[in-house]
Amino acid sequence: MASGFEHGGTATGRQGKASPADIRRTNRALIFNLLFPSQRRSRADLGRLTGLSRVAISDVISDMLDEGLLCETGYAANPTGKGKRGALLGIDTSRLKIISIDLSHPQLIQGAVTDLLGIPQDCMEVALGPDNHVETDAIVQLIDQLRSDLDFGDVLGIGIVVSGVVQEGTVRDSTMLGWHNVELGPLLERQFDLPVVIVNDAIAAMLTERFFGQAGPDLIFTTFGQGVGTATLIHDMPVIGDHHAAGEIGHIAIDPDGPECPCGKRGCLEMLISAHALRERMRHHDARGRADVIRQAGDLFASALAMPVGLLDIADVCVAGPADIINNTFLEAAQQRFDAATGSSFHVRTIIRRCQVGGDLTLRGGAIAVIRRYING
């Protein structure tokens, strides 16, 4: 799978000629993105794919090897048996580390030291009190513990995953955390002198699915838990929105007479079909009744997503959530609704599927967000 990391072009036109530093940064991103997450290519391969000269490729790769971004992983096959075999290059997972903190789960904070693929190497958890309140001091202490055995120069940055609206380093609104305009990024950057990337939990999970699951560069990804969050990927670029609130589908009011939501409206989608809401409804039913609740939830979910699916011409919808909620009954009902609502001669059938990546979905995505920012700026 190609990595699909986004990268910006060099500064041209009215902004003037690109500086050598800009060109070098762009070349580094091109090379890294062709290898992430698991490709192995020779210098000659990378030269052909990027159009860069042998000198430029050798120069940039030398720096990336020294920095710990890349490593040599063996030698390319040589069918003729003549000449020197080229060394294969891949992502170095042995040196540079990322600290990822996940604030998207009820009752606990998860933290991990990961490698450049976001794979946890050392994990810790902090239990929360009955009110699930998160203090910034607890986050600072957890990061302190996770980095205690690491060399400072080997830590690439800190990724923070939260449920809610994120704008750069500020958590604008998180109903789950009860936060409003919390400038967590600047606080942590001052504390640890490391770059901090704060990312919405649905986007974090989507990044993990994109690079380590079955997704291509165009995707709608939805997480079901205490709330309902959606992220959209178009040509490998996450859709953020003018006010950094794209994907907050859980707080779209579906039923104006429905239950009151912490956001202040009534009948929001997550009050109707979040895992918590559905379990509350199911506990009053027998097995057949519980299946009906899940079936109705799948139908309502697909009805809510049919408009953006048709608007954006998305063929892949991936859903992550607990197995008792996101099961075959849910998926079959949602698929039927998608087929009825979006099927046409000019729209490829949209397939809804369950995320199969496994645990640490959001925690891993927090680390991936850090490496994306580090490489692509």
Image (cartoon, rainbow, N blue to C red):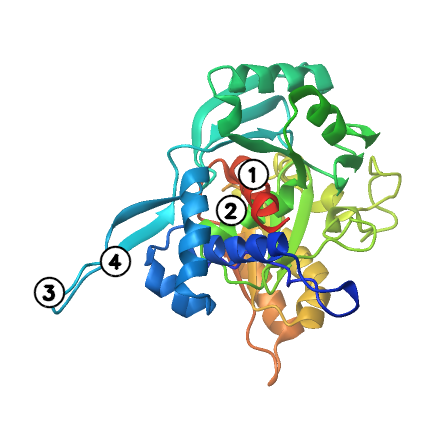
Give, as a three-letter code, the residue at label 2: Thr
Mark 4 element type = loop
Q: CA distance from mark 4 to mark 3?
A: 12 Å
- In the image, is 201 to the left or to the right of 50? right
Mark 4 surroundings: few (<14), some (14-19) or many (≥20) residues within 10 A: some
The residue at the point 46 percent across, 70 percent down is: 51
Give, as a three-letter code, the residue at label 3: Gly
* Residue indicated by mark 3: 81
Residue 56 in the image, given as x and y percentages of width and height: 46, 59
> Which mark sits nearer the N-terminus, 2 or 3?
3
Q: Which mark is residue 86?
A: 4
Please tell me whether mark 1 or mark 3 is closer to you in this view.
3
Q: CA distance from mark 1 to mark 3?
A: 46 Å
Looking at the figure, which quarter contains the N terminus? bottom left
Mark 2 element type = helix
* Residue indicated by mark 2: 208
Please tell me whether mark 2 or mark 3 is closer to you in this view.
3
The residue at the point 61 percent across, 45 percent down is: 373
Mark 3 element type = loop
Give, as a three-letter code, the residue at label 4: Gly
> Which mark sits nearer the N-terminus, 1 or 2?
2
Mark 1 surroundings: few (<14), some (14-19) or many (≥20) residues within 10 A: many
Mark 1 element type = helix
Front-most of 329 and 270?
270
Labels 1 and 2 touching (C-beta < 8 A): yes
* Residue indicated by mark 1: 362
Front-most of 36 and 242?
36
